[in-house]
Amino acid sequence: MSSNPGISEKTPHLLVLGMGGTIAGLAPNPEESPLQYKAGQVGVDALVAQVQSVVPEGVRLVSRQIANINSRNLTEAHLTSLGLAVIEALLDVAIKGIVITHGTDTIEETGLFLQVTCGKLAQTQSKRVILTGAMLPSNAPKADGPSNLLDALRWASTSIDNFPGGIYAVMDGRGCMAMDLAKRHATALNAPLQNAPSSSVGLINPSWLSGVKAVQAAWNEDLPIPKEGEWPWVEILTSHAGARPETITHWLGSAVQGFILAGSGQGGFHDDWVKPLDQAMVQDIALVRTTRTGAGATLRNIPELDRPGCCPSGSLTAPRARIALQLALNAEKQANKAGKPLTWQDFFARIADLPEIR
Ligand code: ASP
């Protein structure tokens, strides 16, 4: 839907894609209990209308609703729809930049998904895709959504020369690469990028920007978006005190295709998992090791030798590693269909080995 009905279809504009979330949330009693609310209640056209009068001059906005959900209910079908909409917009000469309003609970998954499937295209098209959201519902007295949306629109449209096209995120006055998002606080206004290498929105930090360029130089080729209904089934399993073999054996009769093992410390898992995981490998279930600690990298053969075929996650968190493994398994299938003998491990390593911004 066009937010400025007078603008012709061909007028260059920013596209705002709505996914729902708290930024589109409503609280029945916003004054007394702003944190008691329903996410995904307000349409993206209304969110855009709220900021329309204060967008920088010359910036025209068009909005499109992809979903209006609480992002804890995000499905793979939603990711497919969003990814296809982003690709379409990146290829549309009338669109200068893209903003996505999204719930923060799973913005981490969407951030990695878009980097891996659209990151190269955004770079070559010199367009920025900016994810944003809010921690307070739209009718809360101090709602953070409008300022986050405005900042996202600024980043999507800024003409700073050396700020490359790519997939970013903005909240609470700071921005990061979307692949670095990880919600690490239940309520803080900067929850999804609290631990991410970031820059102030207003003044782009040169050392962060050179890190962005290093990541982009290393990311050579986007992976295909799985069709709705064709996403590989991957589960996250957490190792803990008192872990049981049944956590693994439970799945062995199912059609599951991969496990992300959120291990303790450096990504080690309980000895009681060793035998059932060997059986999982015999059954061709893909295994990735990561750490449940929330920070730091999981590296090959540390602390013990990895079993052949099991990949460490690098700095990918469990939710990001899960998306990466799903996309890698799908990419392997597509490559093999085209006669290329590439494995999911080849594709997964491309994602896990991307340089970290410091
Ligand atoms: N549960 C909400 C969601 O992810 C939280 C948020 O948007 O901040 O949709």
Image (spheres, rainbow, N blue to C red):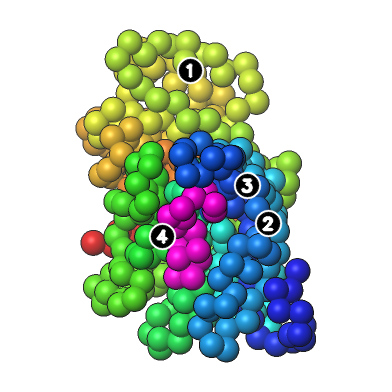
**Residue 122 horizontal/vertical position (percent):** 54, 72
The residue under label 3 is 40
State which tag comes first along the sequence, 2 or 1. Answer: 2
Which residue type carries mark 4? Met
Classify residue 176 as left or right of residue 132.
left
The residue under label 4 is 171
Contact between marks 2 and 1 (CB within 8 A): the answer is no
* Helix, strand or loop at mark 4: strand
Q: Which is in the foreground here, disc 2 or disc 1?
A: 2
State which tag comes first along the sequence, 3 or 1. Answer: 3
State which tag comes first along the sequence, 1 or 4. Answer: 4
Disc 3 to disc 1, C-alpha distance: 35 Å
Which residue type carries mark 3? Gly
* Helix, strand or loop at mark 3: loop
The residue under label 1 is 248
Contact between marks 1 and 4 (CB within 8 A): the answer is no
* Range of magenta residues: 137-151
